[in-house]
Image (cartoon, grey):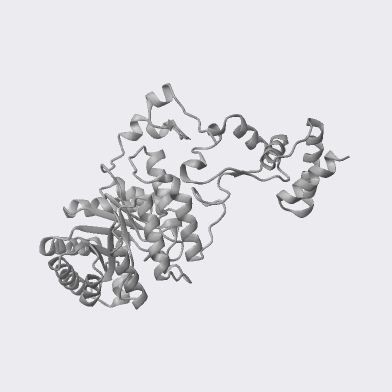
Amino acid sequence: METTQVKGNELEQGKWAGDGYWVSNYNFDEDVISKLHFPKEVIFHDVTLRDGEQTPGVVLRKNEKIEIARKLDEVRIHRIEAGMPVVSQDDFDAVKEIAHLGLDAKVVAFSRLVKEDIETALRCDVEGIICEGPVGVPKLKQFNWSNEQVIDRAVDAIDFAKKHGLWTAFFGVDGSRSDFSFYKELLQEVSEKCHPDSFVVVDTFGCASPEGFGKLVSEVRASVKEPLEVHTHNDFGLGIATALAGIQNGASVVHTSVNGIGERSGNASFEEMAVSLRFLYGQPVRFDFSKFKELSNLVQRDSKVPLAPNKPVVGDRVFTREAGISIAGWMKYNLGSESYLPELVGNKHGVFVGKKSGTHSIEWKMKELGIHATDDQIIKILAEVKKRSEEKKSNIEDDEFRSIVKSVVSD
């Protein structure tokens, strides 16, 4: 399908319209833009193979993890968290093999503040490690660790990792429910004594509002000099918004997972974050968008986590219509009827025929199936489609549609 190239005043005035997309011009109003503070480039850290696998019931085998890692690299992800090597021998083998694939993406492992975890990661030959430690008040109560114990263990583990040549980030679990006086002390102690490569500000339970998380990230930004990363969850359906708030307030790296899979409601969705940055905010994003659907399908197949058909960007029906008036507008001026075309992300258009169909829906479906009818016959076909759809409380599948057309045309 040809895309609509928007030229003229729209492009001269802003970044809201281009080849295959047209979003709101208000996104690029001067007052709006003046309040945005993006880094030169947002780095994407993929957690599909670790946090994504923590989705209840998901088991990714070594060959599946390797296949997903290769596809992530094809899409041009910046960094892959290949797993937690101490979990099992299969995890260890997967992380090690991914580290030796020669990918362009940086390959890192995940660990606790335990030297054994770090030593195991070292044996996998990864480039770096994400070291997690509890910082939220509920987590500290769960672990029964004092503030001093957390600081001591974080300093020891990160110092050990750094001295063994690993790129190292400190991942503060449940940071959005921390006592900031303690959190700040921890960050500064680790910064001064260990010089980590990055700090990850974490909304482990998706319980921070975008505004609240943005405030937390800005406070962390004022406390340490190292680069900041954000890791958010989607418990209130705000994982993307919360991550964006973190980026707006000083972070330069965002943690995402393909299809948004992860514990409970999942992580911030990779594909949603990427298209939001590119089209809603006009930010440079280096990914091969045309492979997003392929990547999504691969992760869906291997994880066995089904997607809602209307999942943004990669859902099977997210570019599908049934309402006649919607299809009429789309057929006349397709880009004006959606914010971006499905081809940009490797998806495709679709039309359901049913109760809400109009004559344009019937015409589109007949053209798709390579069948023909007169204008009068199309009106009769539409009436029968509506009648049967109401009776069966569903749409009309292609075989049944062909049968309806045949019965009308042969009369």
- Vertical side of 6 occupied by 343: above or below: below
Q: x, y (%) of residue 123?
A: 23, 73
Q: Nearer the viewer, residue 383 or 397?
A: 397
Q: Nearer the viewer, residue 22 or 91?
A: 91
Q: Is residue 346 left or right of residue 200?
A: right
- Name which quarter of the figure residue 333 lies in: top right
The residue positioned farthest toward the right in the image shown: 411
The residue positioned farthest toward the top in the image shown: 8
Q: Residue at 30% across / 52% down in the picture? A: 78
Q: Quadrant of the N terminus?
A: top right
Q: Is residue 266 left or right of residue 175?
A: right
Q: Residue at 24% across / 54% down in the picture? A: 228
Q: Is residue 23 left or right of residue 242?
A: right
Q: x, y (%) of residue 388?
A: 79, 49
Q: x, y (%) of residue 33?
A: 33, 34
Residue 97 seen anywhere in this rendered image of the structure:
yes
Q: Nearer the viewer, residue 32 or 87?
A: 87
- Vertical side of 396 occupied by 193: above or below: below
